[in-house]
Image: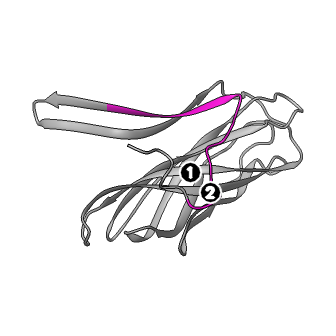
Amino acid sequence: VSTTDFFPAGVTYCSCSLSTFGYWGMDVLHANGRDRIHLGTFVAGLITPSVPTSGIATYNGHAVADIVVTTSSPAGRFLAGASSSVTYNFSAAQISTWTVNFGGGNTLTGSGSSGSPGIPNLGFTFTGTAPVIGSVAGSGNGGFFGGSGSVIPPELATYFSGSGTNGRIAGTTQ
């Protein structure tokens, strides 16, 4: 299975040194049936416990989303790649803009609520249009990697999930 063919032109995996993006899978039999996950996504690394209390940083990278179509054709499950951009305001302790662009007019945008400066607050909500399933809304959270205290962290990753009338979406940005 290709893990790059689904990216829009010009989008590649992050060449991050403090966090790692990857895929995982499982096949579990239980009393109620069977659960399978193929190409689930994750980002792993040491989360930064404290961040600066001033400044703004923009993190550009990639996103991979699992899309489940529940009511329209073609029914099924799809993997979609996208570019991502997150701007974090350290003074307000919030994500001021969160964007995942799949191309073809399919874009998710959001922002976060304010927290306490110096303590990372990476909670956010989003709305937009996802490939195949159309209009969706949801929420997410994330973490910084590297940096400490007054040093702006060099890496950020988020996890997001949402739903709409035609399906569900869940993904990871790095």
Q: Residue at x 25, y 72 (%)?
A: 73
Q: Which residue is mark 1?
A: 63
The reply to whether the C-beta atoms of the residues labelled 1 and 2 are less than 8 Å apart is: yes
User: Magenta stretch?
Assistant: 8-25
Amino acid type of disc 2?
Ser
Q: Residue at x 21, y 29 (%)?
A: 28
Q: Position of residue 151 (x, y in %)?
A: 88, 33
Quarter of the image that includes the N terminus: top left
Amino acid type of disc 1?
Ala
Q: Which mark is residue 95?
A: none
Quarter of the image that includes the C terminus: top right
Q: Residue at x 31, y 39 (%)?
A: 37
Which quadrant of the structure image shows residue 47? Answer: top right
| 18 drawn magenta | yes
Mark 1 or 2 closer to N-term?
1
**What secondary structure is the stretch in magenta mostly built from?**
loop
Q: Is residue 86 left or right of residue 76?
A: right
Report if residue 112 is visible in the image: no
| 63 drawn magenta | no
Q: Which residue is mark 2?
A: 83
Q: Does residue 113 sit above or below 137 in this rendering?
A: above
